[in-house]
């Protein structure tokens, strides 16, 4: 009887959880979905009354860019991570797409990134906690991928455009990073502030600085991680017409 009662309780709990999850998803979809504009609300002809060809002929695809970028570091600190006397360098390509409207007067871009080149400059000998045991250095190569991020871009269309960006992803090294007891795989978090400067109709120069953090999120007990102050530069190529 106790087992049957416990099984029924768990089943009811699962049903309640599924129901709450479905309501949450429906609420999120309703909130994010664009609301239709009627003729009475807008004071103009409803979209449904306009032929499809006329309604879509002036529609432009969202602005998007490819940025061929490089990043280096000029120092590290031990506030969020324990790694010391290390530097991080990377190079790759970033994709930005104006997918999320506006916020605080800025256009909000979705950001994704692939880093085929990542190089960690770290002490050759480290203890369990990431403390250096030697002044000698070693280079540890790796790769990175950032599937999600955002960029706030102000003064879009102007010659000089400030931006604020944050992105999260993963780094994979060829050996355990920042400790012989850490892991090969690490979570990465980046934040940057900078400007884009127009060079031509399609090309812009990007320059910025910020923070690059990685750690293994305690998937193993040893998790020194690393925080570096970083500088970035790149060439932005605008896609589309």
Image (tube, rainbow, N blue to C red):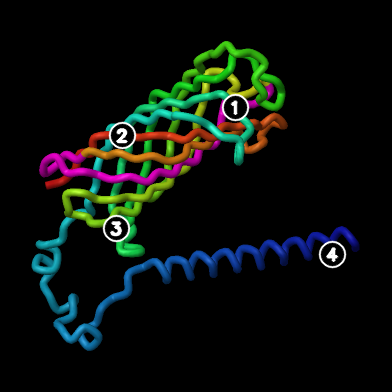
Instruction: Give the mark count.
Output: 4
Secondary element under disc 3, as helix, strand or loop, is: strand
> Earlier along the polypeptide chain: callout 4 or callout 1?
4
Q: Is residue 143 magenta?
A: no
Q: CA distance from mark 4 to mark 2?
A: 63 Å
- The residue nearer to you, when weighing 224 against 58, is 224
Q: Main secondary structure of the magenta part?
A: strand
- How crowded is the residue under tag 1: few (<14 C-alpha within 10 Å), some, or many (20+)? many
Which residue does the numbered mark 1 point to in the structure image?
84
The answer to which quarter of the image holds residue 130 is top right
- Mark found first going from the N terminus, 4 or 3: 4
- Label 2: how many Cα within 10 Å (few below 14, some 14–19, many 20+): many
Farthest bottom residue in view: 40
Q: Residue at x 43, y 38 (%)?
A: 146
Label 3 vs 1, first from the N-terminus: 1
Q: Which residues are magenta?
A: 181-204
Residue at which label 3 appears? 107
Residue at image x 14%, y 79%?
49
Q: Which mark is residue 233?
A: 2
Eye-nearest disc, 4 or 3: 3
- Mark identifier at residue 5: 4
List x then y, in percent, for residue 156: 22, 55
Q: Is tag 1's residue or tag 2's residue first in the polypeptide sequence?
A: 1
In the rendering, at what x and y percent does residue 82 appear?
Answer: 63, 32
């Amino acid at each position: 009887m106790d087992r049957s009662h416990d099984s029924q309780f768990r089943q009811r709990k699962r049903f309640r959880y599924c129901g709450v999850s479905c309501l949450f998803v429906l609420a999120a979809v309703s909130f994010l979905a664009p609301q239709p504009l009627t003729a009475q609300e807008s004071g103009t002809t409803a979209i449904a009354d306009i032929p499809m060809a006329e309604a879509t002929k002036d529609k432009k695809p969202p602005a998007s860019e490819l940025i061929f970028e490089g990043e280096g570091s000029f120092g590290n600190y031990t506030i969020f991570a324990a790694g010391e006397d290390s530097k991080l360098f990377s190079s790759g390509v970033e994709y930005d797409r104006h997918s999320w409207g506006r916020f605080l007067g800025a256009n909000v871009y979705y950001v994704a990134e692939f880093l085929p080149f990542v190089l960690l400059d770290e002490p050759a000998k480290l203890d369990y906690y990431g403390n250096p045991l030697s002044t000698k250095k070693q280079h540890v190569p790796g790769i990175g991928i950032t599937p999600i991020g955002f960029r706030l871009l102000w003064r879009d269309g102007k010659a000089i455009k400030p931006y604020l960006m944050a992105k999260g992803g993963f780094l994979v090294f060829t050996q355990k990073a920042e400790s012989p007891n850490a892991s090969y795989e690490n979570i990465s978090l980046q934040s940057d502030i900078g400007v884009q400067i127009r060079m031509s109709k399609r090309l812009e120069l990007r320059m910025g600085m910020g923070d690059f953090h990685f750690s293994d999120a305690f998937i193993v007990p040893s998790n020194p991680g690393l925080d570096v102050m970083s500088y970035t530069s790149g060439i932005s190529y605008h896609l589309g017409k």
